Image (cartoon, rainbow, N blue to C red):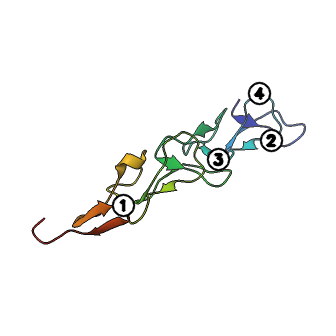
Amino acid sequence: PGTEQPRAGETECVPCGVGYFASAAGQALCEECTAGRSTAGRQGRAQCLPCEPGQHAATPGTARCSACPRGSFSPSEGALHCTNCTASMTTNEIGSRDASQCACPPGQRVTRHGCIPCDEGM
């Protein structure tokens, strides 16, 4: 597992490249990781790993999952895309895992219509 033998008649196998895997021994070619999964930057993998919550991988063959950018989140494993926070809310950090991490930027407060500037003295 984790190797391929692409040339007929050769006996030496080579590790699967980053973003590819081989789950069985003796495979002729490695398979590309599906979207939402990666090889975590390693070669020679027997399987692709799902992106962790707070990460995403939109394209197949991804070497590493990417952290959700500020203003978005991903609550589950294997996400293809991150979900944007509602209205004008954002997150304090990249890699947010839950909608509860979305908040108004400093100096603003939340209303039912989104974030608005705070009143003076607040």
Q: Amino acid at mark 2?
A: Leu
User: How far is mark 3 from mark 1, CA to CA?
Assistant: 43 Å
- Vertically, is 111 above or below 48? below
Q: Nearer the viewer, residue 66 or 105?
A: 105
Q: Position of residue 7 (x, y in %)?
A: 86, 43
Residue 89 in view in this figure: yes
Residue 25's disc number: 4
| Cα distance between the residues tagged 3 and 2 | 13 Å
Residue type beneath disc 4: Ala
- Residue 65 percent location from the top left of the image: 54, 49
Number of marks in the rendered image: 4
The reply to whether the C-beta atoms of the residues labelled 3 and 2 are less than 8 Å apart is: no
Q: Nearer the viewer, mark 3 or mark 1?
A: 1
In the rendered image, residue 24, in percent from the top left (x then y), is placed at 76, 28
Q: What numbered label is drawn on residue 29? A: 2
Report the residue at 76% width, 41% height from top: 30
Marks 1 and 4: CB-CB under 8 Å?
no
Residue 96 visible in this rendered orientation of the protein: no
Of the residues under marks 1 and 2, which one precedes in the sequence? Answer: 2
User: Badge 1 is on which residue?
Assistant: 112
Question: In which image quadrant can residue 117 be found?
Answer: bottom left
Q: What residue is at 51 percent from the left and 54 percent from the top? A: 83
Dot 1 or dot 4, earlier in sequence: 4
| Quadrant of the rendering where the N terminus is positioned | top right
